[in-house]
Image (tube, grey):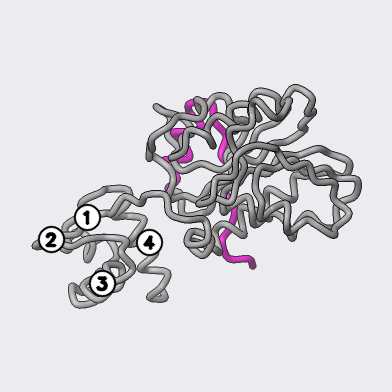
Amino acid sequence: MYMIERQHQILQFIRQHKVVKLVTLTKEFNVSMETIRRDVQQLMQNKKIEKFYGGVKYIEPVEGLIDQRLHEQLAEKIAIAKACASLVQDGECIFIDSGTTTYQMTPFLLDKEKLTVVTNSLPVAFDLIGSNIEVILLGGKVRHSEKSVTSNEFLFRFEHLNINKAFICASGVSIEKGISDFSLDEAITRKQIISISQTVYVATDSSKFNKDVAIQVCPVNDIDVIITDDALPKKTIQHFADNGVPIKVVNTVED
C-alpha cells in the first residue's frame, strides 16, 4: 500500500472512531509504530487530527471559504461529479447546488444538448457562459464566502421551475438528522428546490457521513439517491440501505 493511500485510510478510520490509540492503528494497518508515528505527524501537519499521549483525535471540520474547499478531496469530488453528470439526459432541466462537489459537474455537461441548468452558484454559472447550455441563475442576496445566491424567496418564483433532477451538496449526512448544512440561507434554498424536483440526488464525499452540522435541510427519506466515493465503509452503506436510502458508490481511481 502506498503511503498516501494508507494515510487516507488511517484518517477515515480515525474519523469513524473519533479517538484512537496509536497501538490500535498499528494493529489495524499491520505496520510498525514508527510508520504510524510518521503518518500521524503528516496528518497533524495537514490539521486533520490532533495528538495526545498515546493516541490521536479527529478534528471536526468547520465550513471554510469555497476557494479553500475546492482542493480538498478533489479526486473524490471529481469522481462523484462525473457520476452525477452521467445521469443527466439531453433536454432536461437540472439544478446544480452551490457546493464544491457539484461545481465539478460543469465540464462533464458541455456535450449535452438542449440542457437547462438552474443554479445558485456563481462559479457554475460563469463556467457555463459561452456554452450551449441554458443557464437560469436564482436571484437574491450574494453569499460572498460561498459565491452563491441565497435569500431569494421574495425575488424568485420557485413554483415556475420544472426541475427533472436536482444535485444537492451536504456538509452532514446521517440517518437520524438527515441532510444538514452550516448556512440557514443555503438550507432554505435547498429545501425549496427539493420540494419541486422530480428526482433528488445528494452528491457528497464520504467524510460527510455520520455527521450532523448546524441546520437540517431535509430527512434522508426526502432524497432519492446519495452519490459518494468508495472510502465509505460497507457497514455505513448497509445501514443507509436498511433505512431505505440507496447509496451509489463511485471509484475514486479510474481503471
> Residue placed farthest to the left in the image?
53
Question: On the image, numbered disc 2 is attached to which residue?
Answer: 52
Q: Amino acid at mark 2?
A: Phe
Whether tag 4 and tag 2 are in contact, CB under 8 A, the answer is no
Q: Quadrant of the C terminus?
A: bottom right
Instruction: Name the spot of residue 70 as percent of width and height, x first.
Output: 53, 61
> In the shown orientation, is residue 176 left or right of residue 92?
left
Q: Amino acid at mark 3?
A: Val
Disc 1 to disc 2, C-alpha distance: 8 Å
Circle nearer the viewer, 3 or 4: 4
Q: 188 or 210, which lies in front?
A: 188
**In this rendering, is residue 188 above or below 48?**
above
Magenta highlight range: 233-255
Report the residue at 25% width, 49% height from top: 18
Instruction: Name the spot of residue 252 as percent of width and height, x first.
Output: 56, 61
Asked if residue 234 is among those painted magenta in the image, a careful observer would answer yes
Circle nearer the viewer, 4 or 1: 1
Whether tag 1 and tag 2 are in contact, CB under 8 A, the answer is yes
Residue 9: mark in rendering: 4
